[in-house]
Amino acid sequence: MKVIGIDEFSFREGHHYMTVIADLDTGRVLLAVEGKSKEDIRPFLESLAWKGKKLQAVAMDMSSTYFWAVREILPHAKVVFDRFHVISLMNQAIDELRRVHQAELDSLGEQTLKGSRFLLLRNYDSLESDRKARLDALLSVNRLLFEIHSTIGIERIIITYPLITIIHPNTCRGTH
């Protein structure tokens, strides 16, 4: 077993969660446990560490709980954040920047960014030519927005082509 994945899901109304750990090479479920805390997965992770498995990487969402559990118990394993959560976090950043800039522009009576939220969040290559022209015009007048949008485009390319992308531990949200 070289790569495992950790994920949680809600299985009842309210805050009832189950955590699943699977071997990502075979798809086999290794653990299914009620809860989503560090203590819920600790015994299983400790058994992997104790058995001396040749685990190379652990794929997960950006949950600080899972991140710090893996860092503590399996320090040799690389942490891999899944593509969906990385892109989602980047989209949140560009949307927040758009809101801040639009608030500044509103005070000047300008409507430059109004109605541009989904235009900024869409993949450039999937836009129709008139939408591309509008996006190009928006990005040409706002350097910071251009830089962030370009970074997201680069990240989408990097994340799309390799099977896994290793993220530095300092990018994990939250504390342990």
Image: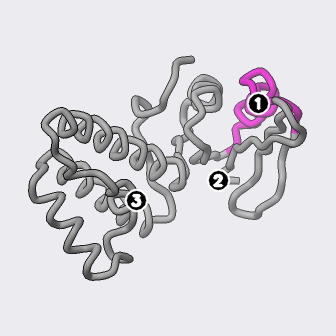
Q: Would you place residue 150 above or below residue 161 in this image?
A: above
Task: Judge the density around disc 3: few (<14), some (14-19), many (≥20) Cα neighbours within 10 Å.
Answer: few
Q: Dot 1 corresponds to which residue? A: 36
Nearest-to-viewer mark from 1 and 2: 1
Distance from label 2 to label 3 (Cα)? 38 Å
Taking the image as drawn, is residue 60 in sight? Answer: yes
Q: Would you place residue 172 above or below residue 26 in this image?
A: above
In the image: residue 25, left or right of residue 93 = right
| First reached walking from the N terminus: tag 3 or tag 1 | 1
Distance from label 3 to label 1 (Cα)? 33 Å
Q: Dot 3 corresponds to which residue? A: 118
In the image: residue 110, left or right of residue 46 = left
- Could you say which is closer to the camera, residue 20 or residue 58? 20
Q: Tag 3: residue type?
A: Phe
Taking the image as drawn, is residue 74 in sight? Answer: no
Q: Position of residue 162 (x, y in %)?
A: 44, 65
In the image: residue 36, left or right of residue 151 = right
Q: Tag 2: residue type?
A: Lys
Q: Position of residue 51 (x, y in %)?
A: 76, 36
Disc marking residue 117: none
Q: Which residues are magenta?
A: 33-53
Q: Position of residue 33 (x, y in %)?
A: 87, 36
In the image: residue 164, left or right of residue 15 = left
Q: Residue at x 76, y 30 (%)?
A: 36
